[in-house]
Amino acid sequence: MTPPPVFISSATLHTLLSHKSLIDHLQFSLPTLTSTTQSPLRHAHQTSPSTSLLLMPSWSCSPSLPYIGVKLVTYHPNNSTQNLPGVHASYVLFNSITGQTLATMDATELTVYRTACISALASNFLSRHDSETLLMIGAGTLAPHLIKAHLTVRPNLKKVIVWNRTAEKAKWVIEKLQSEGGFEGVSFESNGCLEEVVELGDIVSCATNSETPLVKGEKLKEGAHLDLVGSFKHSMRECDDEALKRGKVFVDNEAALVEAGELVGAFERGVITRDEIAGNLLELIKGEKNGRTTAEEITVFKSVGSAVVDLLTAQLAYETYTKSC
């Protein structure tokens, strides 16, 4: 008998997932389970001129992943004026054999965990092992998770700089992290001139809704790794064309080639071609494509998210939950 459905809250998810456990789970599971998992293109519906509803289904044909999952996401960018997250989401997990509902989860929290861990997993292949300075551009819900995930794979990081258009929000992120503890040997700074702090970043991670390029490619230091998380519409751009021209560009999955504003615009302007995209995350994990090959090259990773990663994250949360009961 399948147990009754459970609700896994945001607070409970914090006890079930860690950035390290999820990074390890994704690195192990993506190569073995992606081929047996179906994930149609996400449904995106405009619910007002500025808001959206996204539906992201995925299901597995593998007995080791007997699940169907659907993430339902609302995107309300103006929520920042009310001190609310711009993204809210729920995840529903079903048994793929019987169709029974197994769990409903707070997918807002699930999404920030999986997004940050995908960036960190890519950084493990693309950033320099001796990276010392992380620049976090953006101070939303994702920022603390991205910082912690990058620190998980690059424990040699000594400095974290948080930059945000609203300086108070950057300070808030730092205060939140420092109140949690666990960052011995890491110094924190906030804001300053964006172009100047970009020049300092060994790893530059962006999680914003910007429609004007924030990272100027000419300012990236030799050997930098640029992590682009925020854009998922053609109108959004977190870096300029020069950053893509200078960088060896990887994506999380093929959807980035048709959804990410930085890439779509660069293709249209003839800055780079699709053939110049160096590979995707799965190819990096499998060793089918080489990531960083020299200390001097600039690497770029653009992610837009995928329903497969949502399903694997929900799997880890649910199975950890049931083992603890």
Image (cartoon, rainbow, N blue to C red):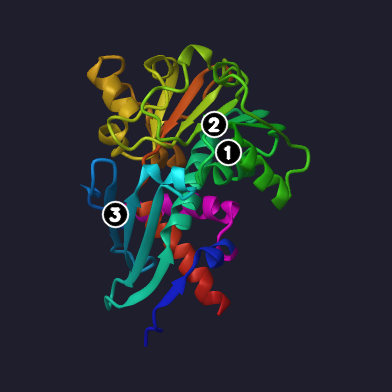
The range drawn in magenta is 15-34
Relative to 215, is 104 on the left or the right?
A: left
Question: Of 231 and 291, which appears nearest the observer?
Answer: 231
Q: Are marks 2 and 1 in contact (CB under 8 Å)?
A: yes
Query: Are the residues tagged 3 and 2 within 8 Å (C-beta)?
Result: no
Labels 3 and 1 touching (C-beta < 8 A): no
Which mark is on residue 183?
A: none
Q: Give the number of the mark in front: 3 or 2.
A: 2
In the image, farthest residue toward the right: 185
- Residue 29 position in % (x across, y down): 44, 55
- For residue 316, above or below residue 297: below
Residue at 57 percent across and 76 percent down: it is 324
The numbered mark, 3 or 1, whose residue comes first in the sequence reads 3
Q: Which residue is mark 1?
A: 169
Image spot of residue 134 (x, y percent): 62, 31
Q: Of all residues shown, which one is farthest toward the bottom?
A: 1
Secondary element at image label 1? helix
Looking at the rendered structure, the kind of residue marked 2 is Asn
| 18 in the magenta segment | yes
Circle 2 residue: 164
Which residue is tagged 3?
56
Report whether 144 appears left or right of 300. Answer: right
Residue 325 in which image quadrant: bottom right
Residue type at the position of mark 3: Met
Q: Is residue 178 left or right of residue 269?
A: right
Residue at x 60%, y 28% (from the top left corner): 128
**Which residue shows up at 33% across the image and 58% down it?**
71
Between 311 and 74, the one lying in front of the other is 74
Most extreme residue toward the front is: 82
Counting residues from the start of the chain, the first of labels 2 and 1 encountered is 2
Secondary structure, mark 2, is loop
Vertical position of residue 83 compared to residue 1: above or below: above
